Image: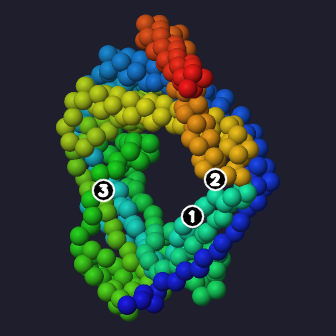
């Protein structure tokens, strides 16, 4: 049976060889910009990693363990560790429906509207003569979305108009948030993310009905209609946390390392010792470092691929030749991106840790030699064939 709430339209266009060649030349310019950007990202990232590692090591060696019950002015401006019950002195509350609870630290309201959604899919095929045919399909269906979708920007707005979303998702925080005699500043409060779903909602504003863990606006939640709204909540109740931060009188705020300005503001639920807090942050920093390394490598690979794009266009009059040249240029781009990535990382590390940097640099040289050797052997084999 066909879904009456879903429809689609397909648009087919053909791009000539000259236009494709022009686009590939524009890609060359983009690639030229991407290469130095990637090298900058890789170098900056390694500097950031060194800063994080040294900052965390110094912080753990100087941290002072204190009690949450009293404020000792002698610890002002120091990096301190403490644990205790974090609660909202004035609890978090949603002013829309007055939902709150004693000591509530954070309250997250999630609003969704049943509305038209546009999904775009695309297929391309290369033709003899160098042209390319693109087929785009725009599919429209009704579904739940947390943000208002602007139907005026649809490919086909007619028949898919979305109503105005009258209520938005929002997070409400207690003010102030306390741990014993101390107040948490906003940066620490925003790091509290262990929300749990509010399971039972009993009161609903006008126009809404309470249905278990949801407030619903519409005739039938089991058969939603365009413009229906549903609201759910998650919250952080008063509970035990462990914190490493700077003491400023009775306020806990972000600590700045005196030597490299690395920022420390660590908070985790439960009783977690300082060593574990710092180890968890070190693991997070490593994930960020590797994500940036991979990102820099991919930028280099993409940049070199764009620069060599016109080579494939020169033989695009025969689709199989275009694919073959494109395959070859990809491996050339890969052979350039790998050693340059390693070189960039090595140079950044040599200044602070020469042994590690030197090792990476040797790996880069070895990779360059190996790739060059393989290319020479392949060329020699082709010449004697």
Q: Position of residue 244 (x, y in %)?
A: 33, 31
* Residue that label 2 marks: 319
Badge 3 crowding class, 10 Å Cα cut-off, few under 14, some 14 to 19, many 20 or more, is some
Q: Earlier in the sequence, mark 3 or mark 1?
A: 1
Q: In this picture, is 353 found above or below 256?
A: above
Residue 160 appears in the rendering: yes
Name the residue at the left extreme.
271
Display coloring: rainbow
Q: Residue at x 62, y 27 (%)?
A: 40
Q: In this picture, is 203 found above or below 29?
A: below
Badge 1 crowding class, 10 Å Cα cut-off, few under 14, some 14 to 19, many 20 or more, is few
Residue 280 lies left or right of residue 28; in this view the side is left
In which quadrant of the rendered image does the C terminus lie?
top right
- SS for tag 1? strand
Q: Earlier in the sequence, mark 3 or mark 2?
A: 3
Q: Position of residue 265 (x, y in %)?
A: 39, 34
Q: Residue at x 22, y 49 (%)?
A: 239
Mark nearer the viewer, 2 or 1:
2
- SS for tag 2? helix
Q: Position of residue 130 (x, y in %)?
A: 72, 55
Q: Which mark is residue 123?
A: 1
Q: Residue at x 31, y 76 (%)?
A: 214
Q: In this picture, is 66 found above or below 314?
A: above
Residue 330 lies left or right of residue 15; in this view the side is left
Q: Which mark is residue 341?
A: none
What whole-number distance in Å separates the C-alpha atoms at marks 3 and 1? 41 Å
* Residue that label 3 marks: 195
């Amino acid at each position: 049976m066909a879904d009456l709430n879903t429809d689609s339209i397909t648009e087919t266009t053909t791009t000539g060889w000259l236009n494709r060649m022009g686009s590939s030349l524009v890609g060359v310019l983009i690639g030229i910009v991407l290469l130095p950007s990637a090298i900058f990202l890789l170098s900056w990232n390694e500097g950031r990693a060194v800063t994080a590692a040294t900052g965390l090591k110094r912080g753990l060696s100087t941290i002072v363990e204190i009690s949450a019950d009293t404020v000792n002015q002698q610890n002002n401006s120091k990096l301190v560790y403490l644990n205790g019950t974090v609660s909202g002195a004035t609890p978090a509350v949603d002013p829309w429906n007055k939902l709150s609870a004693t000591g509530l630290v954070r309250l997250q309201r999630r609003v969704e509207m049943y509305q038209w959604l546009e999904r775009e899919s695309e297929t391309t095929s290369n033709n003899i003569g160098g042209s390319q045919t693109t087929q785009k399909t725009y599919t429209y269906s009704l579904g739940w979305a947390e943000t208002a979708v602007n139907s005026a920007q649809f490919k086909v707005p007619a028949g898919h108009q979305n109503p105005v979303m009258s209520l938005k998702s929002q997070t409400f925080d207690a003010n102030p948030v306390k741990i014993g005699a101390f107040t948490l500043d906003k940066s620490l409060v925003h790091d509290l993310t262990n929300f749990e779903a509010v399971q039972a909602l009993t009161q609903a504003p006008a126009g809404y009905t309470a249905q278990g863990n949801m407030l619903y606006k519409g005739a039938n939640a089991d058969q939603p209609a365009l413009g229906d709204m549903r609201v759910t909540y998650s919250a952080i109740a008063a509970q035990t946390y462990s914190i490493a931060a700077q003491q400023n009188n009775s306020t806990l705020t972000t600590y700045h390392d005196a030597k490299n300005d690395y920022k420390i503001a660590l908070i985790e639920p439960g009783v977690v010792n300082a060593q574990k807090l710092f180890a968890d942050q070190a693991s997070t920093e490593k994930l960020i470092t590797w994500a940036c390394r991979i990102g820099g490598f991919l930028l280099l690979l993409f940049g070199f691929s764009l620069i060599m794009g016109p080579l494939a266009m020169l033989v695009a009059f025969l689709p199989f030749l275009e694919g073959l040249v494109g395959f070859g240029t990809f491996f050339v781009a890969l052979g350039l991106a790998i050693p340059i990535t390693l070189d960039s990382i090595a140079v950044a590390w040599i200044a602070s840790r020469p042994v590690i940097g030197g090792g990476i640099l040797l790996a880069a040289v070895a990779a360059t030699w190996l790739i060059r050797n393989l290319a020479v052997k392949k060329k020699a084999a082709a010449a004697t064939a």
